[in-house]
Image: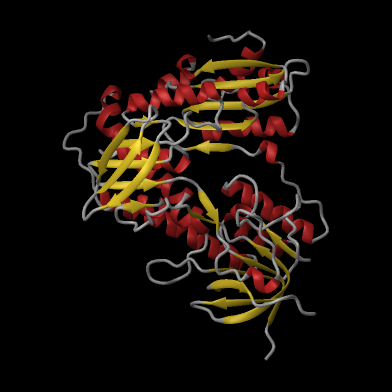
Amino acid sequence: MSTKQFDVVVIGAGPGGYIAAIRAAQLGFSVACIDEWANEKGGPAPGGTCTNVGCIPSKALLQSSEHFEHAGHAFKEHGIEVSGLALNLGQMLKRKNNVVKQNNDGILYLFKKNKVSFFHGRGAFGGAATSEGYPIEISGPTTETITGKQVIVATGSNARALPGAPFDEKLILSNTGALAIEGVPAKLGVIGAGVIGLEMGSVWRRLGSDVTVLEGLPTFLGAVDEQIAKEAHKLFTKQGLKISLGVKVESVTAGENNVTVKYADASGAAQEAVFDKLIVSIGRTPNTNGLAADKAGLALDERGFIAVDDDCKTNLPNVWAIGDVVRGPMLAHKAEEEGVAVAERIAGQHGHTNFDTIPWVIYTSPEIAWVGKTEQQLKAAGTAYKAGTFPFLANGRARALGDTSGMVKFLADATTDEILGVHIVGPMASELISEAVVAMEFKASAEDIARICHAHPSLSEATKEAALAVDKRTLNF
């Protein structure tokens, strides 16, 4: 029996996979994309972790929880009196689920529009390449074998569990369970003060939980510029997040209705805390289980990631891998860029991904965003630099918004003035960072940003003023 043959088969329809499939189709290839995510009715739910239990639903809940907190606290200052404020958590979760479904349906529409053949099920290698290509077995709602002359693996990552404390998604929660808590827990524990831990902790704090964050590292947000991280720590603590650093978790025990965590604090003293729910966010592991990599001879590295070169080529001819399942930052937009680049390389073009200008964002309130080098990285490298900062406290639009927390920080080469890094903690940081990404891609100087006219009043003026501050000539501070 002959199988369906495709020029390109993409395994996984997360941000990297579905974008790779669409770009390959745009370039004239016959393309198949396989994905096993299912919605509550068993239907296809493409979009991967990001769309289903990550980026998209978390931003929906972050927005809803911010509205709730504003209605309970900030609206009064604006002259808006609210009485009888109540939380309808069921409706909030329903809205989150609707946002997810809209994104799932949008991807299916894009596949249809671009003539990408979608298969709902788990894709795995059926063996080594033949003259027709690689056999890819699909199991699940769809069961069949197809072949691909080129294969792009985009199977993403899974939440890492604590040893001896597997996720049950009822008491011990990964990001999946953290997005679907049916009642606001009185006491919520979070192990790991990373992106997921801080975002989910901040959501449930706004909705009424007493939140304690336990972080193993001695420093808060070690990957973030130290000055920005200190400012964020101060703001989060003021909001009510209880953050303990340098913690060593010794045991996690789930009872009938709560979770007990025994740990040593930074001084080594034994501590015990009982939580109604516990979110564990200690990193993610590459999702290669079920891929049958060994059948095709696909090489993995010592940590279980698919081994690739700078162009995302694996050890096998015509097999590529992108996104969380390979080296580099586990970011949806990094996966998208790699997906586009690989599709273009297959077409003989020069696909491009610049890791040095990938923006990072933590969607807390205030948001944290950065691109390029931190001050501590420049010091460690012995790079001579100039720094400039500007607080949102001195920004007219931030005052009008009622959110003046945080700052913008520029780091520029001491000799050439080229921008080496931009770091923001404050309102809409995720949007503001894009200007810095564009500037750095074009090798702009801080003076270039300082000379560009920015709309007034706007939050972006803080970016201009921070660039001016590099030369110690801010105009509004």
Task: Locate residue 425, reporting x and y percent.
Answer: 50, 27
The image quadrant where one finds the N terminus is: bottom right
Report the residue at 31% width, 29% height from top: 240
Q: Residue at x 76, y 56 (%)?
A: 344
Please name the residue shown 54% across and 10% down the image: 476
* Image position, residue 88 (x, y; %): 24, 48
- In this image, 318 relative to 268: left or right? right
Comparing 69 with 199, the one in front is 199
The outermost residue toward the right is 348
Indicate whether 252 appears above or below 98.
above
Q: x and y percent of residue 341 in the render?
A: 73, 53
Occupied quadrant, residue 40? bottom left
Residue 246 to residue 27: above or below: above
Closest to the observer: 231 or 289?
A: 289
Q: How many marks?
A: 0
- Determine whether 475 is above or below 157 in the image: above
323 lies left or right of 5: left
* Residue 415 screen position, x and y as percent: 77, 15
- Between 307 and 111, the residue placed more toward the observer is 307
